[in-house]
Amino acid sequence: MWSSRWLFVLAAAGSAVGLGNIWKFPYITGENGGGAFVLIYLACVALIGVPIMMAEVLIGREGRQSPINTMRLMVQQHRASPAWVLIGWMGVLAGFLILSYYTVVAGWALNYIWQMASGRFVDVSGPEAGAIFDTFLASPWQLLFWHTLFMMATIYIVARGVLKGLEAAIRWFMPLLFVLLFVLVGYAVTTDGFAQGFEFMFAFHWEDVTANTVLIALGQAFFTLSLGMGAIMAYGAYVPSNASIAGTVGIIALLDTLVAIGAGLAIFPIVFANGLEPGQGPGLMFVTIPLAFGQMPLGVLFGTVFFVLVSFAAITSAISLSEPALAYLVEEYNAKRARVAVSFGVLSWFLGIGSVLSFNAWADLHFLGERTFFDTVDHISQNVMLPLGGMLIALFAGWVLPRTVVGAQLGLQRAWTNVLWKILCGVLAPLGVLAVFAGSLLG
Ligand code: PFF
């Protein structure tokens, strides 16, 4: 059990705030044209993400086991179809897939601690910053080295148990990350690209919206909140019974959104002030942020600290990616945590080699249309499996779990709150996901 509600907030926020906010959100916003994407994303977080996160926490706290066994228990207790347990299995698979490329990108951040500390970016120009990153990506051995290092660090922490070490990390690093993002946004405000960056992020143009934009925004909402794969359900299993689920989830979603918007507000002005491309893809943060620190007084120090913090944010998320699988294996087979952690990590590391090669040797190898191996694994997990998992979780919490169970978990005392929950979680959230899927299939 978490020793308090706050510890759960920290752990869940640690899972939610990660590369999804700082690296991914700005780059897919750039690739999808800015404002329209951001606003649809915010709507997805509020209308679909928050209810589904509540559903995950409530199911987790009701079952108090790993997601797979929690679903088994729920199915037995409420005489539902055993097919619902698939939610748990799909989550394990999604976590495995995401971890495989997450550690590749987190490895880039690890490398950048070192790059920043050595002063490599002091006073470089936009194109020079881009070239440093491109040279790095072109070397499979370097990427493999950092991918391996990051995976080893993740497995080490996971093997020791989530709470030890993690707590201190989250307690200190999350607030620091906020402060540094604040500094970066402050710097961005002083550049002459701020107005343009702001406009790029928040000006809504209907003509930019396609079914695919909405699918990507929805996938990002799930990814950034760690939803749809049981990570939050697994953490929810340890939430004290008297903590308010709605309040807690609201705080987590708000923190997560603030970090993403802060990252965007830091990055896009720098893009425009330096004549860079907003749609340049996965390298966006690794070019703009070092560039900004390179121009700032004390930039070497701040820049180094920034990438340390990003690495910590990434590791607290990476840990939660493996939790549904490990919790299940430990529970079911009475296995040693360290042993299953190593096996899971090694397999995922191996798959990650495909993502490493996507940026160099396999750059021209395409799957599912124009996608590299990295993009394919990313797309299937983030844009298909997470929304599908989330939709099933919402349907389960909305229609299968009895009202008494949900009401007691959420503290719903009035008739209208019950109705509101039914509408949000049982109808709107699943329909929203379904509509987005249908729209993107029809093109
Ligand atoms: N929410 C994490 C991020 O934004 O970086 C990524 C993530 C972690 C997704 C855990 C899913 C998950 F279960």
Image (cartoon, rainbow, N blue to C red):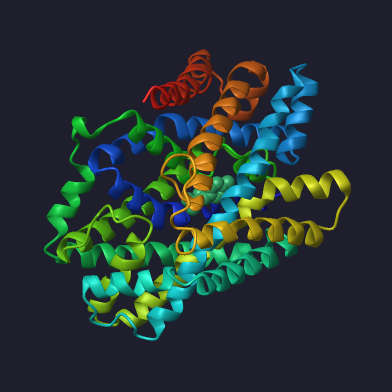
Task: Name the residue rendered at 27%, 78% in the picture.
Answer: 294
Whether residue 434 sits left or right of residue 271 in the image: it is right
Q: Where in the figure is residue 43, as x and y percent of width and height?
A: 35, 33
Q: Is residue 5 visible?
A: no
Picture quadrant where residue 69 is located: top right
In the displayed structure, 210 sits above or below 189; it is above
Q: Where in the figure is residue 246, as x and y percent of width and height?
A: 51, 34
The outermost residue toward the right is 334
The outermost residue toward the bottom is 118
Task: Name the residue rendered at 32%, 55% in the picture.
Answer: 262
Q: Where in the figure is residue 213, as x and y percent of width and height?
A: 33, 35
Task: Name the residue rendered at 70%, 36% in the picture.
Answer: 89
The C terminus sits in image quarter: top left
In the displayed structure, 206 sits above or below 328; it is above
Task: Name the residue rendered at 45%, 43% in the picture.
Answer: 253
Q: Where in the figure is residue 314, as x and y percent of width and height?
A: 52, 60
Between 386 and 406, the one lying in front of the other is 386
Between 338 and 132, the one lying in front of the other is 132
Q: Is residue 8 visible?
A: yes
